[in-house]
Image (spheres, rainbow, N blue to C red):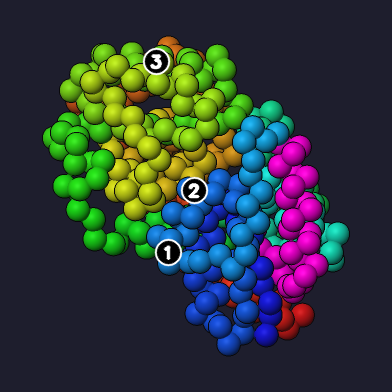
Amino acid sequence: MLNVAVVVGTRPEAIKMAPVILELGRHSDRFATRVISTGQHREMLDSALALFEIQPHVELKVMRPNQSLAGLTASLLARLDAELERQPPDWILAQGDTTTVMVAAIVAFYRRIKFGHVEAGLRTGDFAHPFPEEFNRRVADVAADLYFAPTERARSVLLREGIESGRILVTGNTVVDALLTVAARPFDRRKGVLAGLRSAAPLVLVTAHRRESFGPPFRELCQAIRELSERFPDAEFLYPVHLNPNVRSPVQEILADLPGVHLTEPLDYLEIVHAMKSASLILTDSGGIQEEAPTFGVPVLVMRETTERPEGVDAGFVELVGTNRERIVEAAAKRLVANSPRPTGANPYGDGRAAARIVGALLESRKS
């Protein structure tokens, strides 16, 4: 039996690793699975895991008020290392590009534990965009033993960096697995946040929280949303606001007085999935939404200067618009006019079977 530790720290990691955790559970005769929560974003992380009926076996609770990245990294290193010394697994799995993932990779390397990186091979080529995620994922890919690449493009990146082809598996993105599972669940639009919106009005879903946009760029994108709301009074703008004060302060200052802009607390994943499904347009700086929205054929404007997910751009689902107010307004206005065509085609990020491929690769690793 293989002992597998799955390390998660934020809501996106929890959502993307939930299908893998559940798939490991379906093979409980072959895997002993332990879920370790670092609590990097504890409130949102817990609600995401609960949606999939997953309870962490270990909670490290590393976050402190106003904690620096260096402080977070130091705390994670000490606590995760102690936990893995206490109960060393055969494999550590972690997903993506957060500080939790980077530290999991480092501890795995120091402890000589095999490390599988889910969503390996994403790159912008710019360490400042996104910051610190571009650095984090490169560190994770230096330490990995198995690379679970979401797309052929990600596989090509890893091959160019010298990774042996036999250690790379193109799986699709596990977020598509999670999305399809949640989208199939019953949902009553008459309850929750969506109940307060005009059902016949175009819905613009907004999510924005990237660290590299804090300050003037973030104020610019908020001003763009304000201008769009004033220009398109028949549209409803739904913005679940991240808990970070660097996000909340400018959002409240610039957008709180607009009747067409609905500022809410972060939504649970079930509600955000159905908000995406109902949307006419999405404005975001989120990586996950770039991967999810194509399933519903919803156009996405990415308020960043670069993306590590160019497949959506190539397929016509995603457009990069940066954080410049005029550029955001111009691109969104084109999408909000009557009869604007919607993108069509298959989701380039996966088919809903990524978790099964990942667990299958771990089963194969037992034979080597």
Q: Is residue 259 left or right of residue 96?
A: left
Judged from the image, the secondary structure of the residue bearing numbered disc 3 is helix
Question: Which is more toward the observer, 109 or 61?
Answer: 61
Between discs 2 and 3, the one toward the N terminus: 2
Q: Is residue 329 left or right of residue 102?
A: left
Q: Is residue 43 left or right of residue 366?
A: left
Magenta segment, prevailing SS (helix, strand or loop)? helix
Give the position of the N terminus as an image quadrant. Answer: bottom right
Which region of the structure is painted magenta?
A: 69-95
In three-dimensional space, the C-alpha distance between marks 3 and 1, rounded to whole angstroms, equals 36 Å
Using the rendered image of the protein, determine whether residue 141 is visible from the camera's viewpoint: no
- Residue identifier under label 3: 254
Where residue 102 sits: x, y (%)? 72, 49
Crowdedness near tag 3: few (<14), some (14–19) or many (≥20) residues, C-alpha within 10 Å: some
Judged from the image, the secondary structure of the residue bearing numbered disc 2 is helix
Residue type at tag 3: Ile
Tag 2 near tag 3, CB within 8 Å:
no
Where residue 288 sits: x, y (%)? 49, 45
Which residue lies at the image location 24% right of the left edge and 45% below the top edge?
192
- Residue identifier under label 2: 43
Question: Which is more toward the observer, 133 or 46?
Answer: 46
**Vertical arrangement, residue 51 with respect to residue 203, above or below:** below
**Vertical arrangement, residue 224 with respect to residue 64, above or below:** above
Toward which corner of the image does residue 133 lie, by quadrant?
top right
Residue type at tag 1: Phe
Using the rendered image of the protein, determine whether residue 71 is visible from the camera's viewpoint: yes
